[in-house]
Image (cartoon, grey):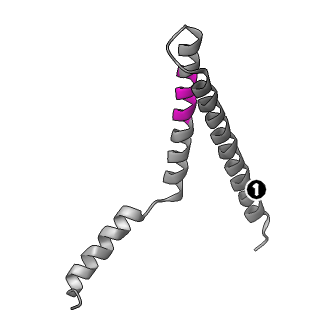
Amino acid sequence: MPLPLSNRLMRTEQAQTTTSFSFPDLMKQGVQQVNSMQQDANSQINELLTGGDVNQAEVFTSVQKADMAFRMLVQVRNKLIAAYEEINSIRV
């Protein structure tokens, strides 16, 4: 049996509010995640250098993950700048 229209509309609204992201929000979230990864790697490095109980392989892995995430973020930025410049060069 189909749901009443009001129930279908409510479910549609709920689905839209839970899955709708704006592009600036996604970028902000990405930058925050990369920043968090870099801070975690830095804290692990500091703990390793001060004689803390941390595995060298884990430190190396977290540094590499932070580096890859940062490089990817820079590439996304470069692609966005290239797209912006291409759009600006279009003559109307």
Vertical arrangement, residue 26 with respect to residue 12, above or below: above
Q: Nearer the viewer, residue 57 or 81?
A: 57
Q: Quadrant of residue 50?
A: top right
Q: Quadrant of residue 5?
A: bottom left
88 with respect to 4 (left or right)? right
What residue is shown with label 1? 82
**Residue at image point 73% right, 49% down:** 78
**Residue at image point 52% right, 18% down:** 54
Residue 34 screen position, x and y as percent: 57, 38
Magenta span dominant secondary structure: helix
Q: Which residues are magenta?
A: 35-43
Q: Hey, what amino acid is under mark 1?
A: Ala
User: What is the secondary structure assignment of the residue under circle 1?
Assistant: helix
Question: Could you classify mark 1 by the number of other residues whose Cα lies within 10 Å: few (under 14), some (14-19), or many (20 or more)?
Answer: few
Seen from this angle, which residue lies furthest top?
Answer: 50
Is residue 13 in the magenta section?
A: no
Q: Quadrant of residue 19?
A: bottom left
Q: Nearer the viewer, residue 78 or 64?
A: 64
5 with respect to 18 (left or right)? left
Residue 62 screen position, x and y as percent: 59, 31
Quadrant position of the C terminus in the picture: bottom right
